[in-house]
Structures are given as structure tokens and as C-alpha cells.
Image: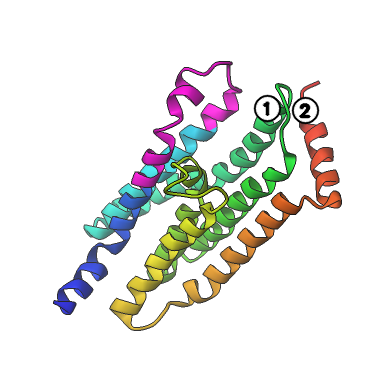
Amino acid sequence: MFTVIQNGLARYFYFAMSLLIVAVVVAGFGRTIDAGLLHPDAPRPALLYVHVTLCAAWVLLFALQSGLARTGRMALHRRLGVSAAVLGGALPIVGVATAIVMHNWRSARGPSNPAFLSVSLNDMLTFSIAFGLAIYWRRRPELHRRLMLIASCALTVAAFARLPAYLVPHRWWYAYVDLLILLGVARDLLVERRVHAVYRYGLPCVMAGQAGALYLYLAAPPAWLSLLHSVLRAAAPA
């Protein structure tokens, strides 16, 4: 029985994880997409729709690429990798710009906490580093697929934040992101009897970034707020 589980994890884990990430995104955003995007009470900035489209495209492309790797269609996987590289490179740029634009949009309509931008900025930074390393090590599958998993997990924070509080308590979103990554750790322990270096070094770095982001959000140090206000003023429409 244990051998069957090992074989199943060895063969299907990354594809299954890509489907789980799709499910998390659908479950989270499915609750808010109608009121927030499709039929909003006030028109949203166009950049928000671009950001949502890019994120949705990434999650779907990640699932497709995982499926192609699982079925051994590596030639098509590599060809689509060019599109993934372009999409992944654009995503953090648009993500940061969207976070700033949406904060200014909300603050024009009522009180808005700029310190929360630390969460969005950390998510984009985590994605960028993991994605960049995955591209750099694209010819080393054991590194590449784990880094791509971490990058994709980093994008689920907003989806977890939209789930009901009885499932995901307020401000506990990062614990669920880490749980997704820990599934990769558990897979390695069961299949390979060791934890891969990507997780040994990557997960502590991810968690350190999360802790820093939460500190900047909750404590809101004056120097951090001053920097954010300068950026937000520079980005505000004339």
C-alpha cells in the first residue's frame, strides 16, 4: 500500500497540486468576482482587469504545463515555456502597479490603510524570486518544478483571504500558503526520504518574507508609511 502511495505521489503530485491551486483560486475569487468585477457598484480601474486576466492565465497555464510534463509532452511544454516566461515576467510588474492604483482608487472613496500594501508587495516579490530562479534552472527539472510550485503558491494569498473566516481566519492567509508548500515537503519525505534543498532554503525565506510583510502591515512603522505615501503620491493621477 505504501509503495502504491509513493508511486502515485511520484507520478501525479505536481499535476494534482496545480489543480488544487486552481480550486483554491476559483473558490476564493468565485465568491467576490460578481460584485467586485462583473457587476461592481462603481467602475474599477482598467488595470485591475488586466491583473486578474494575467493571474488567471498564469494559474491555468501552470496547470496545463504540469499536465504536459506529467504526460511526457516535453516538446510542447518547452514551447509554451516561452509564453510562461513572458507572462511570469509581466505579472509582478502589473501586480505591483495594480496594488498601488487600487489603493489610490479606494482612498479616494474612503479610509484606506496603505500599510496593507506590504502584503501585496511581498507576494509579488516572492513570486518574482521563485519564478526567476525557476527560469534560470529550467533545464534542471528537480529545481524547476519545485520553484514553479512555490511561485504559484505565492499567488494564492488573495484567494485564501476571500474564503469564509471559519475556513481561513483573518490574517492567517499565509499559513495556508505555507501549508500548500509543506505538501511539497511531505511529498519529498514520502517519495525520496529527504527534503529537497529548494524547500530547505526556500520555505524559510518565504516565511521570513511573510513575517516581514505582516509586521509592516500590522505595526505600520512611520518610516515605512512615509515611504509608501511618497510612492502613492507619485502614482496618484494628476
**76 relative to 234 in the view: left or right:** left
Residue 138 in view here: no
Residue occupying the point 46% across, 55% down: 153
Above-or-below relation of 111 to 200? above
Give the foreground label among 2 and 1.
Answer: 1
The residue at 81%/20% (across/down) is 238
**Residue at the farthest front position:** 166
Is 138 included in the stretch rendered in magenta?
A: no
At 47% from the left and 46% from the top, the residue drawn is: 160
Q: Is residue 62 above or below residue 200?
A: above
Q: Is residue 55 visible?
A: yes
How crowded pointer 1 is (Cα within 10 Å; few <14, some 14-19, many 20+) is rated as few
Classify residue 22 by image quadrant.
top left
Say which residue appears at 47% left-offset and 23% top-offset. 35
The stretch drawn in magenta includes residue 40: yes
Residue that label 2 marks: 236
Residues at marks 2 and 1, CA–CA distance in whole angstroms: 12 Å
Residue 235: where, in percent of width, then height?
Answer: 77, 32
The x and y percentages for residue 5 are: 20, 72
- Return the residue nearer the eye: 133 or 30: 30
Residue hosting label 1:
106
Give the left or right position of residue 139, taking residue 96 as reference.
left
Query: Image height check: is 85 above or below 105?
Result: below
Q: Secondary structure at mark 2?
A: loop
Amino acid tagged 1: Arg
Q: Position of residue 217 (x, y in %)?
A: 70, 50
Q: Earlier in the sequence, mark 2 or mark 1?
A: 1
Disc on res. 29: none
Q: Main secondary structure of the magenta part?
A: helix
What's the residue type where badge 2 is placed? Ala
What is the span of residues highlighted in magenta in the rendered image? 22-50
Judging from the image, what secondary structure is the residue with disc 1 in? helix
